[in-house]
Image (tube, rainbow, N blue to C red):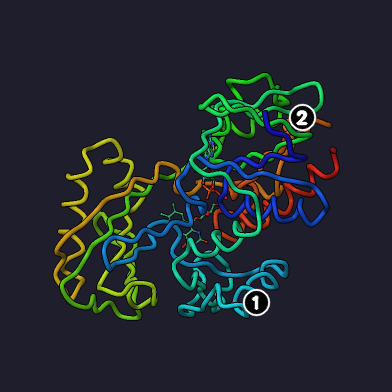
């Protein structure tokens, strides 16, 4: 059995931000993640000489807290600006900078994880309330004890691990979680024989199966021609449980006409919980009044990297208020 002040489940942007904040407040933390590396949906994969961001593609900055944090990352060389464009989600369509991790999107969570205790390849099976706080039980049988826990997986995964333990959600939180729906996304990582030739390094075809294409060489993260192709939500819903060979072939066929170079090899990745269809503007929620189990993640603060960051801060502050 291992003991810390706070357990954080999920080493994505929300969980790592929450851990950093709690450490600043003087608490000891451990961040547990089922993945092989930190980052969650801020994911980067290297295949031979090609490197692909296959989850989040870039991020914009709207809040003062995230602006300050991003400026710091830029000063120390963790984040670069990629391009500027009008926002599609803000009413005044203001021009916003799109930022990226200097070595790929994962390099940001990797930077955050470097100063924290993060245990990867650790799947949490359930959370229990224990006499002195909480216990997190891993599928390996390992148990961590703490005064409180922050849970940041996508909501259906949080519901699963809570459902196996003895934490009772208040009825309002339970109802809130039951309304959450995520769009899936199918991602294809395509190696090209020559440069991709996408104008400004990215494209939103808006027709057929493809929603987004990005040139990872143009981003400055890949030594060889490497394009990420993301499906539309509608196409992903239709093909989510199909054999990956089917949708990789369909998506590469549809992508080829937009590219200067020819696709010579392609690998697929399924994002079952890509982005929540709707989000709550609450920051984070406690399982119930006074219960040291706080739920965070982008669904509570905006379906973007910035939302995950803001939710991480809010989750840490909520738990601090309960402990
Ligand atoms: C294809 C795609 C494209 C996107 N594009 C953009 C974009 O361009 N710009 C933007 O701002 N945002 C984008 N996003 C959204 C952005 O990536 C997310 O909003 C953000 O990264 C979510 O962070 P999070 O910490 O809330 O969750 P996550 O990053 O999902 O972290 C949750 C973590 O919990 C872990 N976990 C789950 N269950 C367990 C368990 N039982 N035990 C242990 N660990 C567990 C997971 O492994 C994961 O690492 C995109 C997302 C996807 C998938």
Residue 156 position (above or below residue 39): above
Question: Which numbered disc, 2 or 1, marks the residue that appears first in the sequence?
Answer: 1
**Residue carrying label 2:** 288
162 left or right of 243 in image: right
Label 2, secondary structure: give it.
loop
Quadrant occupied by the N terminus = top right
Res 172 quadrant in image: top right
Residue 23 position (above or below residue 157): below
191 left or right of 306 in image: left
124 left or right of 85 in image: right
Q: Residue 46: horizontal and vertical position, in percent?
A: 34, 61
Instruction: Determine whether label 2 and label 1 are within 8 Å by CB.
Output: no
Question: 29 or 246: which is nearer to us?
Answer: 29
Quadrant occupied by the C terminus = top right
Residue at image location 72% in from the left, 46% down from the top: 315
Residue 255 position (above or below residue 167): below
Residue at image location 72% in from the left, 54% down from the top: 313
Residue at image location 67% in from the left, 67% down from the top: 66
Label 1, secondary structure: give it.
helix
Label 2 CA crowd tier, 10 Å (few <14, some 14–19, many 20+): some
Please state which of the two labelled residues, at mark 2 or mark 1, is closer to the viewer.
1
Q: CA distance from mark 2 to mark 1?
A: 36 Å
Question: 12 or 113: which is nearer to us?
Answer: 113
**Residue carrying label 1:** 71
Question: 216 or 201: which is nearer to us?
Answer: 216
- Total tally of numbered discs in the picture: 2
């Amino acid at each position: 059995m291992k003991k810390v002040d706070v357990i954080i489940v999920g080493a994505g942007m929300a969980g790592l931000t929450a851990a950093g904040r709690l450490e600043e407040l003087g608490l000891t933390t451990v961040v547990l993640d089922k993945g092989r590396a930190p980052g969650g949906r801020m994911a980067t994969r290297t295949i031979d000489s090609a490197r692909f961001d296959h989850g989040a593609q870039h991020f914009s900055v709207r809040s003062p807290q995230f602006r300050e944090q991003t400026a710091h990352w830029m000063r120390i060389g963790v984040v670069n600006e990629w391009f500027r464009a009008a926002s599609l989600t803000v009413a005044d369509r203001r021009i916003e900078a799109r930022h990226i991790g200097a070595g790929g999107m994962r390099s940001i969570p990797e930077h955050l994880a470097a100063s924290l205790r993060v245990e990867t390849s650790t799947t949490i099976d359930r959370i229990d309330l224990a006499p002195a706080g909480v216990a997190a039980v891993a599928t390996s049988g390992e148990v961590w004890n703490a005064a409180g826990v922050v849970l940041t997986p996508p909501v259906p995964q949080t519901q699963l691990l809570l459902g196996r333990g003895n934490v009772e959600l208040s009825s309002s939180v339970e109802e809130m979680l039951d309304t959450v729906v995520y769009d899936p996304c199918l991602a294809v990582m395509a190696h090209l024989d020559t440069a991709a030739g996408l104008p400004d390094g990215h494209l939103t075809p808006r027709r057929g199966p493809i929603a987004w294409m990005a040139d990872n060489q143009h981003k400055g993260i890949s030594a060889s021609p490497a394009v990420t192709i993301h499906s539309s939500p509608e196409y992903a819903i239709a093909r989510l449980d199909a054999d990956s060979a089917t949708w990789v072939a369909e998506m590469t066929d549809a992508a080829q006409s937009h590219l200067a170079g020819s696709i010579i090899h392609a690998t697929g990745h399924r994002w079952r919980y890509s982005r929540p269809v709707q989000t709550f503007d609450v920051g984070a929620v406690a399982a119930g009044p006074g219960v040291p189990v706080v739920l965070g993640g982008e669904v509570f603060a905006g379906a973007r990297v910035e939302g995950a960051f803001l939710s991480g801060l809010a989750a840490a502050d909520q738990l601090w208020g309960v402990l």
